[in-house]
Image: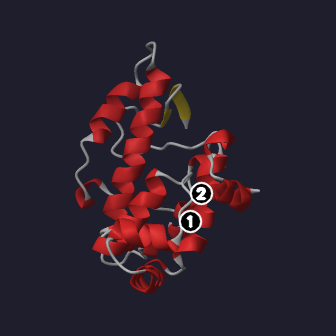
Amino acid sequence: MRSLDVRSWGNDPAGGTELLTGTYQVTREVSERLLRALPPLLVLRAQEWNCPLIPLLADEIVKDEPGQEAVLDRLLDLLLIAVLRAWFARADARVPGWYRGYADPVVGTALKQIHHAPEQPWTVLSLARAAGTSRATLARRFTELVGEPPMAFLAGWGCWDYSAGIERQSLSPQAKARCS
């Protein structure tokens, strides 16, 4: 093997196989829940999915222009989402409960509230109100679909989000207590 340039490596620049890889340097950049849901190695072949991001990424990788790092970072984030959607859509995928829960009108609403505003002092009652249902219905459906009660999920999500950079001053007293 010989090095072809900073971002290419292999025997032949016109070889028959192309691999695009990317990494997150800090583990908190990707949720532990997400990492636990994935296999150690995830491979999606070109014929298994159609992703318009791949040509954009391939074009940007070979550039050496101002802003390239920011563009590559954003494309990597978008590619991760596209890969997850394609992977979880497979018949043989072990889809995590929190992902399945998004399809449910009640649980999906509660999950969106938690994800969009983890700093809020959420309770089962306030999440149930947002979802237009009772506490009992939300708690039962959430636990069935996600695999844990809403407040347990919230505790894990809020602390992850806090570790990713939410300003401590913006957290409610309940969220500060959960993440201490």
Check disc 2: other Cα within 10 Å, few if <14, some if 14-19, many if 20+: many
Q: Is residue 155 above or below residue 77?
A: below
Check disc 1: other Cα within 10 Å, few if <14, some if 14-19, many if 20+: many
Q: Residue at x 65, y 57 (%)?
A: 175
> Which label sits on residue 158?
2
Residue 76, given in percent of the width and then of the height, sits at 44, 40
Residue 148, given in percent of the width and then of the height, sits at 54, 79
Residue 54, given in percent of the width and then of the height, sits at 31, 40
Q: Residue furthest top?
A: 66
| Viewer-nearest residue: 39 or 139 | 139
Label 1 – label 2 distance at C-alpha: 6 Å
Check if mark 1's residue and mark 2's residue have beta carbons within 8 Å: yes
Q: Residue at x 44, y 51 (%)?
A: 116
Q: Residue at x 44, y 79 (%)?
A: 142
Q: Which residue is mark 1?
A: 154
SS for callout 1: helix
Is residue 63 shown left or right of residue 30? Answer: left
Q: Say if residue 125 shows up in the picture.
A: yes
SS for callout 2: helix
| Viewer-nearest residue: 62 or 36 | 36
Q: Residue furthest right?
A: 180
| Amino acid type assigned to the residue bearing label 1 in the image | Leu
